[in-house]
Amino acid sequence: MRPLVALIFLTVAAGAAERDGAIVESSVVQPSARVLGRLSAADKAVLESVESRQITYLSDGLKIKGYVVVPRTGEKLPGVIYNRGGNRNFGAVTERTVDTDLALIASWGYVVVASQYRGNMGGEGRDEFGGADVDDVLNLIPLLEAEPRADAKRIGMIGWSRGGLMTCLALTRTHRIAAAVLGSSELDAFNTLKQRPEMEQIYADLVPHFEQPAVREGALIARSPVRWVEKLNASTPILLLHGSADWRVDPAQALAMANALYAAKHPFRFVFFEGGDHGLSEQAAEVNRLTKDWLDRYVRDGKTWPALEPHGR
């Protein structure tokens, strides 16, 4: 359990409490001694530069669990929506995720928000692995709009593994994301089942009515962004990161996605890490640098994408 520094119960008007994205409970948390004991001096400095809050917010009227991590200094900061991987409580945002990954992104000068998705870690509803739970991601946008120190006109999105799928699904429904990062992402459900047949049971457990033949095909297509890149918001540049030694998500998915994005003339950059595992753990420093540069250029600074048509000498 993470020790509480302070427990803050938010009191809001009834109308506000019912609004999607409204925070109905928030508690300030601090890292445990166990986590601090494992951190380097540099990582401790990062952690000390931010404040983390565990939250419950509303999405489709459901109470969803999540986190907000904010730098201790700065005003009108751009936001980042972080989409976790896994399913149910596997791959959930943990103490380590908050104190390392989310804290690092926040230390770059961003208000970071993350959802556990419905039905997970004590939240209401049911995880659908890319179904109605995408609303839980989109409802973090009005949550950012209500954050006093966030500039919700500048929002980026980061998704890892299943979170990459959630990011792509969100990009079909909003133009508010200035740039996105897809890391080791689930982008082709058909390939996933071919390479990892055990995922059939995951889909059967989570996707509504998946056992029905008439539903199954459409559900897999809906969870295969590689098949519908033209539906992604055309003005959101994508940084695509994947490792060649990823056993959880076939690297061929990223290669196919790069080809599909290129064919659609969607702005993107693809970095393929030789020998990289699913978490790109051995390339963490480079991944962090690339991610920060991407967010700073297209989210913080609002740079425009270079011309995509053939040109030059």
Image (cartoon, rainbow, N blue to C red):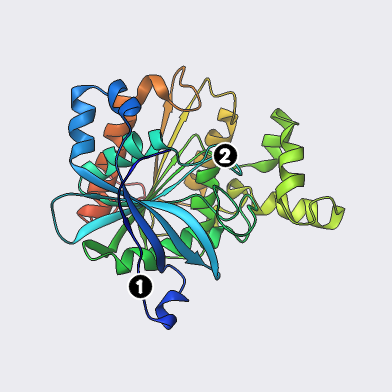
Task: Tell me the quadrant of the picture where the C terminus can be found.
Answer: top left
Tell me which residue sits at (71%, 36%) in the image: 199
Q: Report the amino acid beneath label 1.
A: Thr
Q: Tell me which amino acid carries mark 2.
A: Gly
Mark 2 or mark 1: name the one nearer the start of the chain: 1
Q: Is residue 304 visible?
A: no
Between residue 46 and residue 288, name the one nearer to us: 46
Q: Residue 11: give its label.
A: 1
Q: CA distance from mark 2 to mark 1?
A: 33 Å
Name the quarter where the N terminus is drawn. top left
- Percent across and percent down for residue 58 are 48, 66
Q: Give x and y (percent) for residue 32.
A: 33, 33
Q: Front-most of 187 and 161?
A: 161
Above or below residue 126? Residue 256 is above
**Helix or strand or loop: what does disc 1 sit on?**
loop
Q: Image quadrant of residue 33?
A: top left
Q: Is residue 300 above or below residue 42?
A: below
Q: Position of residue 34 (x, y in %)?
A: 35, 25
Residue under label 2? 86
Query: In the image shown, does 82 or 262 lie closer to the viewer?
Result: 82
